[in-house]
Image (tube, helix red, strand yellow):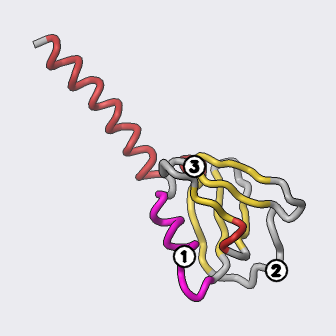
Amino acid sequence: MIADTIAFTVQSCLDFGALLRDGFGMTFDQIRVAKEQAPFRPFTLFLSDQRQFQITHPDFLWLIPGGRTIALAHDDGAVEILDLVRITSLKSGGNGADGHD
C-alpha cells in the first residue's frame, strides 16, 4: 500500500512536469517543423523572460539531441542554449530583417 502511494506520487510529479512542458511551452517537434519547413519561412521564438529571437535562416537554430534544448546563433557569432520550457510561443512569418534580439 505504501509502495503504491509512493509510486503514484512519483508518477504524478513526473506527469506534472510533462503537463508544464507541454501545456505552457513549445515542444521539440513544433520547433523542428518550423525549422524544416520547405521553403523556409522566418519565424520568431518568444521566451518567458520577454525576449524574442527571430530565426532568419534554419542554420541559425540547432536542435540538440534529447529533445529538451535548442541552440540559437546570434548575429555577433555568440551561441545561446535554451531549455524548451523557457520558449512560450512561436510566430511564423515576417521578413526576418531585424535579426536576433
Q: Which residue is mark 3?
A: 69
Query: Viewer-proximal residue, 98 or 57?
Result: 57
Q: Residue at x 58, y 67 (%)?
A: 90
Q: Residue at x 86, y 59 (%)?
A: 77
Q: Nearer the viewer, mark 3 or mark 2?
A: 3
34 drawn magenta: yes
Residue 28 position within the rendered picture, expressed as x and y whole percent measured from the top left: 48, 58
| Amino acid of disc 1 | Glu
Quadrant of the image containing the N terminus? top left
The answer for how far apart the CA atoms under marks 3 and 1 are is 17 Å
Q: Main secondary structure of the magenta part?
A: helix
Q: Is residue 85 above or below residue 77?
A: above
| Lower position in the chain sequence, tag 2 or tag 1 | 1
Which residues are the magenta region? 27-40
Q: Which residue is mark 1?
A: 36
Query: Viewer-proximal residue, 6 or 69?
Result: 69
Q: Residue furthest bottom?
A: 39
| Occupied quadrant, residue 46 | bottom right
| Lower position in the chain sequence, tag 3 or tag 2 | 3
- In this rendering, position of residue 57 left or right of residue 15: right
Q: Residue furthest front?
A: 65
Q: Please give the label number shown on residue 72.
A: none
Q: Residue at x 60, y 77 (%)?
A: 92
Q: Which residue is mark 2?
A: 97
Q: Is residue 46 above or below residue 65?
A: below
Residue 79 position within the rendered picture, expressed as x and y whole percent measured from the top left: 77, 53
The answer for how far apart the CA atoms under marks 3 and 2 are is 25 Å
